[in-house]
Amino acid sequence: MQPRSDPRRGFIVAKAEYAAVRLDPGGRAPPRDKRARKRGVEEIDRHGIVHNAAHAGRGHRPPVGTAILIEPCRDRGMALPETVRRNAHPDTDGKTPFRRRDDLARVPWHLRVLFSFTVTFARSSARVQSLGLAARLGYGRTMCGRVRLSSDVSEIKLVFSIPPHRPTPNFPASWNVAPTDPLPVVRYDRKAEERSLDVLRWGLVPYWAKDIKVGFANINAKAEGIETRPAFRDAFERRRCLVPVDNFYEWKKTATGKQPYAIALADRRLMALAGLWENWRSPAGEWVRSFAIITTTPNELCAELHNRMPVVLKPDVWPVWLAEESVGAADLKAMLTPYPSAEMICWPVSARVGNVKNNDASLIEPIAA
Protein backbone atom coordinates (compact mmCIF):
# COMPACT_ATOMS: atom_id res chain seq x y z
CA MET A 1 0.00 0.00 0.00
CA GLN A 2 1.46 3.33 -1.05
CA PRO A 3 1.26 6.24 1.36
CA ARG A 4 -1.59 8.46 0.30
CA SER A 5 -1.26 12.14 -0.34
CA ASP A 6 -3.39 13.13 2.63
CA PRO A 7 -1.16 15.71 4.39
CA ARG A 8 -2.47 14.65 7.78
CA ARG A 9 -1.15 11.09 7.52
CA GLY A 10 1.62 10.28 9.95
CA PHE A 11 2.40 6.68 10.85
CA ILE A 12 0.67 3.30 11.07
CA VAL A 13 0.67 0.86 13.97
CA ALA A 14 -0.10 -2.63 12.76
CA LYS A 15 -2.07 -5.33 14.54
CA ALA A 16 -3.14 -3.26 17.53
CA GLU A 17 -4.59 -6.31 19.29
CA TYR A 18 -5.40 -4.20 22.30
CA ALA A 19 -6.99 -1.40 20.36
CA ALA A 20 -10.48 -2.34 21.44
CA VAL A 21 -10.54 0.58 23.80
CA ARG A 22 -11.29 4.19 23.17
CA LEU A 23 -8.28 6.36 22.57
CA ASP A 24 -9.78 9.12 24.70
CA PRO A 25 -9.27 8.16 28.39
CA GLY A 26 -11.21 11.15 29.64
CA GLY A 27 -14.50 9.87 28.27
CA ARG A 28 -14.96 12.82 25.92
CA ALA A 29 -14.84 13.06 22.15
CA PRO A 30 -11.67 14.72 20.79
CA PRO A 31 -11.82 18.48 20.33
CA ARG A 32 -12.96 19.58 16.90
CA ASP A 33 -10.97 22.75 16.36
CA LYS A 34 -8.72 23.13 13.31
CA ARG A 35 -5.53 22.12 15.05
CA ALA A 36 -7.13 19.04 16.58
CA ARG A 37 -8.45 17.92 13.21
CA LYS A 38 -4.92 17.99 11.83
CA ARG A 39 -3.94 15.56 14.56
CA GLY A 40 -7.09 13.53 14.03
CA VAL A 41 -7.19 9.81 14.57
CA GLU A 42 -8.53 7.50 11.88
CA GLU A 43 -9.53 3.99 12.75
CA ILE A 44 -9.28 1.41 10.00
CA ASP A 45 -11.49 -1.62 10.44
CA ARG A 46 -11.76 -4.55 8.11
CA HIS A 47 -14.39 -2.72 6.07
CA GLY A 48 -12.51 0.50 5.51
CA ILE A 49 -11.75 3.78 7.21
CA VAL A 50 -13.87 5.54 9.79
CA HIS A 51 -12.83 9.12 9.23
CA ASN A 52 -12.21 10.76 12.65
CA ALA A 53 -13.12 9.28 15.95
CA ALA A 54 -14.88 12.49 16.92
CA HIS A 55 -17.66 11.66 14.49
CA ALA A 56 -17.80 7.93 15.14
CA GLY A 57 -19.89 8.19 18.28
CA ARG A 58 -19.09 7.79 21.94
CA GLY A 59 -19.58 4.03 21.89
CA HIS A 60 -17.29 3.36 18.92
CA ARG A 61 -14.68 0.71 19.53
CA PRO A 62 -12.42 -0.67 16.80
CA PRO A 63 -12.60 -4.48 16.54
CA VAL A 64 -9.75 -6.73 17.62
CA GLY A 65 -7.23 -7.10 14.83
CA THR A 66 -7.70 -3.51 13.79
CA ALA A 67 -4.90 -1.30 12.50
CA ILE A 68 -4.82 2.14 14.08
CA LEU A 69 -3.75 5.01 11.87
CA ILE A 70 -2.47 7.99 13.81
CA GLU A 71 -2.34 11.17 11.79
CA PRO A 72 -0.13 13.98 13.05
CA CYS A 73 0.11 16.66 10.38
CA ARG A 74 3.03 16.61 7.96
CA ASP A 75 4.15 20.05 8.95
CA ARG A 76 5.36 18.43 12.18
CA GLY A 77 8.28 17.09 10.20
CA MET A 78 7.36 13.47 9.48
CA ALA A 79 7.95 11.78 6.15
CA LEU A 80 7.39 8.34 4.66
CA PRO A 81 10.53 7.63 2.61
CA GLU A 82 9.63 4.05 1.74
CA THR A 83 6.57 2.23 0.52
CA VAL A 84 4.44 0.55 3.15
CA ARG A 85 3.59 -3.02 2.17
CA ARG A 86 0.81 -5.24 3.41
CA ASN A 87 1.65 -8.96 3.53
CA ALA A 88 4.33 -8.19 0.92
CA HIS A 89 1.64 -7.47 -1.68
CA PRO A 90 1.60 -3.84 -2.80
CA ASP A 91 -1.74 -2.12 -2.79
CA THR A 92 -0.89 0.85 -4.96
CA ASP A 93 -4.30 2.42 -4.99
CA GLY A 94 -4.88 1.88 -1.30
CA LYS A 95 -8.46 0.74 -1.85
CA THR A 96 -8.32 -2.87 -0.65
CA PRO A 97 -9.82 -3.11 2.84
CA PHE A 98 -7.74 -4.49 5.71
CA ARG A 99 -8.28 -8.11 6.72
CA ARG A 100 -7.86 -9.92 10.02
CA ARG A 101 -4.44 -11.29 9.13
CA ASP A 102 -3.11 -8.14 7.52
CA ASP A 103 0.18 -6.80 8.76
CA LEU A 104 2.37 -3.95 7.67
CA ALA A 105 6.04 -3.92 6.73
CA ARG A 106 8.53 -1.82 8.62
CA VAL A 107 7.82 1.89 8.48
CA PRO A 108 11.02 3.95 8.52
CA TRP A 109 10.85 7.54 9.61
CA HIS A 110 13.00 10.65 9.51
CA LEU A 111 12.10 12.89 12.42
CA ARG A 112 12.97 16.54 12.04
CA VAL A 113 11.30 17.33 15.34
CA LEU A 114 10.81 15.23 18.43
CA PHE A 115 7.53 13.35 18.33
CA SER A 116 6.58 10.13 20.04
CA PHE A 117 3.54 7.99 20.48
CA THR A 118 3.04 4.63 22.14
CA VAL A 119 0.36 1.99 21.71
CA THR A 120 0.59 1.53 25.46
CA PHE A 121 -1.64 4.58 25.68
CA ALA A 122 -4.43 2.64 24.00
CA ARG A 123 -3.81 -0.41 26.16
CA SER A 124 -3.78 1.50 29.42
CA SER A 125 -6.67 3.86 28.76
CA ALA A 126 -9.15 1.23 29.85
CA ARG A 127 -7.49 1.26 33.25
CA VAL A 128 -7.43 5.05 33.69
CA GLN A 129 -9.72 6.26 36.47
CA SER A 130 -11.63 9.49 36.33
CA LEU A 131 -10.21 12.34 38.38
CA GLY A 132 -13.20 12.31 40.68
CA LEU A 133 -12.90 8.62 41.53
CA ALA A 134 -9.11 8.86 41.84
CA ALA A 135 -9.39 11.76 44.24
CA ARG A 136 -11.89 9.91 46.39
CA LEU A 137 -9.62 6.87 46.56
CA GLY A 138 -6.70 8.99 47.68
CA TYR A 139 -4.78 9.45 44.43
CA GLY A 140 -3.76 12.73 42.85
CA ARG A 141 -4.48 14.78 45.97
CA THR A 142 -4.18 18.51 45.75
CA MET A 143 -4.05 21.21 48.41
CA CYS A 144 -6.64 21.53 49.84
CA GLY A 145 -8.28 18.17 49.07
CA ARG A 146 -9.52 16.78 52.39
CA VAL A 147 -11.03 18.49 55.43
CA ARG A 148 -12.83 17.82 58.71
CA LEU A 149 -16.04 19.49 59.89
CA SER A 150 -17.25 17.78 63.02
CA SER A 151 -18.52 20.85 64.89
CA ASP A 152 -22.25 21.09 65.48
CA VAL A 153 -24.14 23.12 62.89
CA SER A 154 -25.71 25.28 65.59
CA GLU A 155 -22.21 26.22 66.77
CA ILE A 156 -21.24 27.12 63.21
CA LYS A 157 -24.22 29.47 62.99
CA LEU A 158 -23.17 31.22 66.20
CA VAL A 159 -19.50 31.61 65.18
CA PHE A 160 -20.37 33.03 61.77
CA SER A 161 -23.26 35.22 62.96
CA ILE A 162 -26.00 33.45 61.04
CA PRO A 163 -29.41 34.80 62.16
CA PRO A 164 -31.37 32.21 64.21
CA HIS A 165 -34.34 32.33 61.84
CA ARG A 166 -32.25 31.26 58.86
CA PRO A 167 -32.64 27.57 57.97
CA THR A 168 -30.25 25.20 59.70
CA PRO A 169 -28.87 22.62 57.25
CA ASN A 170 -28.94 18.98 58.20
CA PHE A 171 -25.25 18.15 58.06
CA PRO A 172 -23.84 15.28 60.14
CA ALA A 173 -20.36 15.54 61.62
CA SER A 174 -17.67 14.39 59.19
CA TRP A 175 -14.00 13.76 59.90
CA ASN A 176 -13.17 13.02 56.26
CA VAL A 177 -14.83 15.35 53.75
CA ALA A 178 -13.61 14.82 50.17
CA PRO A 179 -14.15 16.60 46.83
CA THR A 180 -17.72 16.29 45.43
CA ASP A 181 -19.04 15.86 49.00
CA PRO A 182 -21.57 18.40 50.35
CA LEU A 183 -20.35 20.93 52.87
CA PRO A 184 -22.01 23.88 54.70
CA VAL A 185 -20.87 27.22 53.28
CA VAL A 186 -21.42 30.76 54.59
CA ARG A 187 -22.80 33.23 52.00
CA TYR A 188 -24.27 36.71 52.08
CA ASP A 189 -27.90 37.13 51.04
CA ARG A 190 -28.00 40.58 49.41
CA LYS A 191 -31.78 40.75 49.29
CA ALA A 192 -32.25 39.95 52.97
CA GLU A 193 -28.97 41.67 53.88
CA GLU A 194 -27.93 38.84 56.16
CA ARG A 195 -25.74 35.76 56.15
CA SER A 196 -26.93 32.25 55.40
CA LEU A 197 -25.53 28.77 55.89
CA ASP A 198 -26.20 26.51 52.91
CA VAL A 199 -24.94 23.10 51.82
CA LEU A 200 -23.02 23.20 48.54
CA ARG A 201 -21.11 20.63 46.51
CA TRP A 202 -17.31 20.75 46.74
CA GLY A 203 -15.86 21.31 43.26
CA LEU A 204 -16.89 24.51 41.48
CA VAL A 205 -18.86 24.03 38.26
CA PRO A 206 -18.88 27.26 36.19
CA TYR A 207 -22.30 28.38 34.97
CA TRP A 208 -21.16 27.91 31.36
CA ALA A 209 -19.90 24.34 31.82
CA LYS A 210 -21.52 21.56 29.80
CA ASP A 211 -20.75 18.78 32.28
CA ILE A 212 -20.69 18.63 36.07
CA LYS A 213 -17.40 16.71 35.85
CA VAL A 214 -15.67 20.04 35.33
CA GLY A 215 -15.95 20.44 39.08
CA PHE A 216 -13.35 17.70 39.63
CA ALA A 217 -10.67 20.07 38.34
CA ASN A 218 -11.98 23.04 40.35
CA ILE A 219 -11.89 21.92 43.96
CA ASN A 220 -9.19 24.56 44.49
CA ALA A 221 -8.63 28.00 42.97
CA LYS A 222 -5.13 29.46 42.97
CA ALA A 223 -5.02 32.99 44.36
CA GLU A 224 -2.52 33.98 41.70
CA GLY A 225 -4.47 35.16 38.65
CA ILE A 226 -7.83 34.24 40.14
CA GLU A 227 -9.39 37.46 38.86
CA THR A 228 -8.65 36.52 35.22
CA ARG A 229 -9.28 32.77 35.08
CA PRO A 230 -12.56 32.04 33.22
CA ALA A 231 -13.73 29.46 35.76
CA PHE A 232 -13.33 31.81 38.73
CA ARG A 233 -13.30 35.47 37.67
CA ASP A 234 -17.07 36.04 37.84
CA ALA A 235 -17.35 34.23 41.16
CA PHE A 236 -14.38 36.17 42.53
CA GLU A 237 -16.15 39.41 41.68
CA ARG A 238 -19.69 38.55 42.82
CA ARG A 239 -19.94 35.19 44.61
CA ARG A 240 -17.44 34.83 47.44
CA CYS A 241 -18.06 32.63 50.47
CA LEU A 242 -16.55 31.24 53.66
CA VAL A 243 -15.99 27.50 54.10
CA PRO A 244 -16.05 26.52 57.81
CA VAL A 245 -13.75 23.60 58.75
CA ASP A 246 -12.19 22.30 61.95
CA ASN A 247 -9.00 21.31 60.18
CA PHE A 248 -7.66 20.25 56.81
CA TYR A 249 -5.33 17.38 55.97
CA GLU A 250 -2.12 17.21 54.02
CA TRP A 251 0.32 14.42 53.17
CA LYS A 252 4.06 14.73 53.75
CA LYS A 253 6.45 12.69 51.63
CA THR A 254 8.72 10.46 53.70
CA ALA A 255 11.26 7.73 53.00
CA THR A 256 8.58 5.09 53.57
CA GLY A 257 5.69 6.77 51.75
CA LYS A 258 3.31 9.60 52.62
CA GLN A 259 2.36 10.54 56.16
CA PRO A 260 -0.94 12.42 56.61
CA TYR A 261 -1.07 15.44 58.92
CA ALA A 262 -4.00 17.39 60.36
CA ILE A 263 -3.57 21.19 60.30
CA ALA A 264 -5.73 23.40 62.54
CA LEU A 265 -5.71 26.73 64.36
CA ALA A 266 -3.60 26.65 67.50
CA ASP A 267 -6.64 27.45 69.70
CA ARG A 268 -8.72 24.83 67.82
CA ARG A 269 -11.34 27.38 66.77
CA LEU A 270 -13.30 26.91 63.56
CA MET A 271 -11.39 27.94 60.45
CA ALA A 272 -12.92 30.13 57.76
CA LEU A 273 -11.43 29.17 54.41
CA ALA A 274 -11.81 31.66 51.55
CA GLY A 275 -14.08 30.23 48.90
CA LEU A 276 -15.99 30.96 45.69
CA TRP A 277 -19.39 29.60 44.82
CA GLU A 278 -21.34 29.21 41.61
CA ASN A 279 -24.75 28.21 40.23
CA TRP A 280 -24.92 25.64 37.43
CA ARG A 281 -27.91 24.22 35.61
CA SER A 282 -27.65 20.68 34.28
CA PRO A 283 -28.99 19.71 30.83
CA ALA A 284 -31.91 18.10 32.68
CA GLY A 285 -32.77 21.43 34.30
CA GLU A 286 -31.47 20.63 37.79
CA TRP A 287 -29.71 23.46 39.65
CA VAL A 288 -26.42 22.65 41.38
CA ARG A 289 -24.61 25.03 43.73
CA SER A 290 -20.91 24.32 44.11
CA PHE A 291 -17.80 25.92 45.59
CA ALA A 292 -14.00 25.96 45.41
CA ILE A 293 -11.43 26.66 48.12
CA ILE A 294 -8.81 29.30 47.35
CA THR A 295 -5.17 28.35 47.91
CA THR A 296 -2.01 30.42 48.26
CA THR A 297 1.69 29.98 48.99
CA PRO A 298 2.33 28.15 52.28
CA ASN A 299 3.48 29.56 55.59
CA GLU A 300 6.50 28.07 57.36
CA LEU A 301 4.44 25.34 59.02
CA CYS A 302 2.63 24.15 55.90
CA ALA A 303 5.71 24.48 53.67
CA GLU A 304 7.12 21.39 55.37
CA LEU A 305 4.14 19.42 54.08
CA HIS A 306 3.12 20.97 50.76
CA ASN A 307 3.84 23.86 48.41
CA ARG A 308 0.31 25.29 48.80
CA MET A 309 -2.14 25.96 51.61
CA PRO A 310 -5.76 27.12 51.77
CA VAL A 311 -6.42 30.80 52.45
CA VAL A 312 -7.62 31.16 56.06
CA LEU A 313 -9.45 34.42 56.78
CA LYS A 314 -9.67 36.11 60.17
CA PRO A 315 -13.06 37.30 61.49
CA ASP A 316 -12.30 40.98 60.95
CA VAL A 317 -12.21 40.54 57.15
CA TRP A 318 -15.27 38.29 56.84
CA PRO A 319 -17.68 41.16 56.05
CA VAL A 320 -15.45 42.43 53.25
CA TRP A 321 -14.93 38.98 51.75
CA LEU A 322 -18.66 38.23 51.83
CA ALA A 323 -19.35 41.51 49.99
CA GLU A 324 -21.19 43.04 52.92
CA GLU A 325 -18.83 45.95 52.33
CA SER A 326 -17.77 47.15 48.90
CA VAL A 327 -14.03 47.02 48.08
CA GLY A 328 -11.91 46.77 44.96
CA ALA A 329 -10.21 43.71 43.48
CA ALA A 330 -6.80 44.82 44.77
CA ASP A 331 -8.08 44.85 48.36
CA LEU A 332 -9.57 41.40 47.90
CA LYS A 333 -6.35 40.01 46.46
CA ALA A 334 -4.46 41.45 49.43
CA MET A 335 -6.42 39.10 51.72
CA LEU A 336 -5.24 35.99 49.90
CA THR A 337 -2.02 35.57 51.88
CA PRO A 338 -0.65 32.78 54.10
CA TYR A 339 -2.07 32.59 57.61
CA PRO A 340 0.49 33.28 60.37
CA SER A 341 2.37 30.08 61.08
CA ALA A 342 2.59 30.85 64.82
CA GLU A 343 -1.21 30.67 65.07
CA MET A 344 -1.50 27.19 63.54
CA ILE A 345 -0.65 23.68 64.65
CA CYS A 346 -0.24 20.33 62.89
CA TRP A 347 0.12 16.74 64.01
CA PRO A 348 0.51 13.32 62.30
CA VAL A 349 -2.61 11.18 62.01
CA SER A 350 -3.48 7.69 60.88
CA ALA A 351 -3.12 6.73 57.22
CA ARG A 352 -6.75 5.59 57.43
CA VAL A 353 -7.76 9.14 56.52
CA GLY A 354 -6.57 8.41 52.99
CA ASN A 355 -9.69 6.30 52.42
CA VAL A 356 -12.95 8.26 52.48
CA LYS A 357 -14.79 5.15 53.63
CA ASN A 358 -13.17 5.77 57.01
CA ASN A 359 -15.02 8.53 58.81
CA ASP A 360 -14.81 8.62 62.58
CA ALA A 361 -13.23 10.64 65.38
CA SER A 362 -10.19 8.36 65.60
CA LEU A 363 -8.89 9.84 62.33
CA ILE A 364 -7.67 12.99 64.09
CA GLU A 365 -5.98 11.27 67.02
CA PRO A 366 -2.24 12.04 67.06
CA ILE A 367 0.16 9.21 66.25
CA ALA A 368 3.94 8.88 66.30
CA ALA A 369 5.36 10.23 63.03
Image: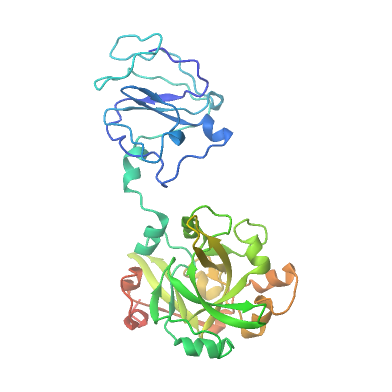
- Image quadrant for the N terminus? top left
How many numbered marks, from 0 up?
0
Is residue 66 in view? Answer: yes
Residue placed most toward the observer, 288 or 22: 288
Q: Looking at the rendering, which quadrant does residue 361 occupy?
A: bottom left
Depicted 217 relative to depicted 241: above or below:
above
Depicted 152 relative to depicted 48: above or below:
below
- Image quadrant for the C terminus? bottom left
Asked whether, in this view, residue 294 is left or right of residue 121, the answer is right
Asked whether, in this view, residue 133 is left or right of residue 241, the answer is left
Residue 279 place in picture, x, y as percent: 56, 65
Identify which residue is drawn at 40% across, 41% down.
Answer: 58
Identify which residue is drawn at 27% across, 28% down.
Answer: 65
Residue placed most toward the observer, 354 or 230: 230
Identify which residue is drawn at 51% across, 86% down.
Answer: 156
Residue 313 place in picture, x, y as percent: 60, 79
Residue 127 place in picture, x, y as percent: 31, 48
Seen as rendered, the residue at the extreme left is 101
Q: Looking at the rendering, which quadrant does residue 3 occupy?
A: top left
Seen as rendered, the residue at the extreme front is 285
Identify which residue is drawn at 31% across, 70% down.
Answer: 357
Residue 360 place in picture, x, y as percent: 33, 80
Depicted 57 relative to depicted 179: above or below:
above
Residue placed most toward the observer, 61 or 21: 61
Is residue 226 in view? Answer: no
Asked whether, in this view, residue 21 is left or right of residue 42, the answer is left
Q: Looking at the rendering, which quadrant does residue 105 occupy?
A: top left
Asked whether, in this view, residue 225 is left or right of residue 286, the answer is right
Give the colouring mode of the picture. Answer: rainbow
